[in-house]
Amino acid sequence: MGRPTTGDFRKTDGWLDWYAGPSKPRFVLPTGSVDAHCHVFGPGAEFPYAPERKYTPCDAGKAQLFALRDHLGFARNVIVQATCHGADNRALVDASRASAGRARGVATVRRSVTDTELQQLHDAGVRGVRFNFVKRLVDFTPKDELLEIAQRIDAFGWHVVVYFEAVDLPELWDFFTALPTTVVIDHMGRPDVSKPLDGPEFTLLRRFLREHPHVWSKVSCPERLSNGGPPALHGEQAAYRDVLPFARAIVQEFPDRVLWGTDWPHPNLKGHMPDDGLLVDFIPHIAPTAELQKKLLVDNPMRLYWPEEL
Ligand code: 0GY
């Protein structure tokens, strides 16, 4: 896959580059599996990073993403606009167009977006917008603006992906339930996995999912949520063990509303950069049966991103 570069931009201090030369997973992905959460970064020389960004990543372009897809055994990608590109979706659109129909996208748009621009994004494969509430990543956007965007994109049949920290769910609850579209929660709403599974925060997330059938969750990012170290071996039971019960609980209770993604190239990771092959080997620990694996990796993402093929 080659080594990451920085282009003309100076990477954020301490930025970890993605893992070059990932291993081959032991877990054989079901045919037609979708990596439903990944990003492209630039390359900055071609698709400059946004002036309002909170970090400058290493370049991580479409060719490297598609090489990883093939190496791991995925058939398709859902490319999620990363905050370092702001509302400039050109890198995402370029990657999606180059994928020959094997990628769809989740964009970031502002209130000023026109219907023509939304149609162009749709034609390029965009099927959702992302609202980000993680304060270290974005500036505040008023909720009435976001609601207006949600109403506009609902007309295109898109959904809203939301990224927030677990402690903020109570404050965001009413806003999320007012959204007219399907709502997809990134990374299980970032639970603090040092707290008990049946503690108030995660119980609230489960209640939120239980009471709102239009809400889905990604069960991705064990490497981001874990307080333990990386797995040393393929299929090692202990890998990210503290995250396991959280992800498994969501998959088991809401098997038709869960998605999984690598999160490549893993923005803002501290401590270690995961080998994506080992990350794939985490999947059977959270979705232990072939039926659950097929829902998580094929049926659910196809329903959301390629419904015309079902
Ligand atoms: C993720 C997580 C992060 C970053 C972004 O768009 C982004 O910048 O999503 C993070 O820093 O937690 O989903 O990739």
Image: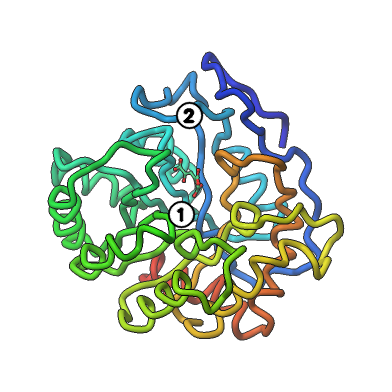
Q: Residue at x 20, y 57 (%)?
A: 150
Q: Which mark is on residue 55?
A: 2
Find numbered disc 2 in the image and state the secondary structure of the residue it sits on.
loop
Q: Determine the residue positioned at 62% across, 77% down.
A: 293
- Mark 1 belongs to which amino acid? Gly
Give the spatial CA distance, label 2 vs label 1. Answer: 30 Å
Residue 281 falls in image quadrant? bottom right
Would you identify the image quadrant in which residue 167 lies?
Answer: bottom left
Whether 242 is drawn above or below 250: the answer is: above
Position above or below: 168 against 206: above
Q: Quadrant of the N terminus?
A: top right
Tag shown at residue 50: none
- Residue type of the residue flagged with mark 2: Tyr
Q: Position of residue 213 (x, y in %)?
A: 32, 81
Residue 192 spot, x, y in % from top left:
54, 61
Q: Position of residue 141 (x, y in %)?
A: 22, 43
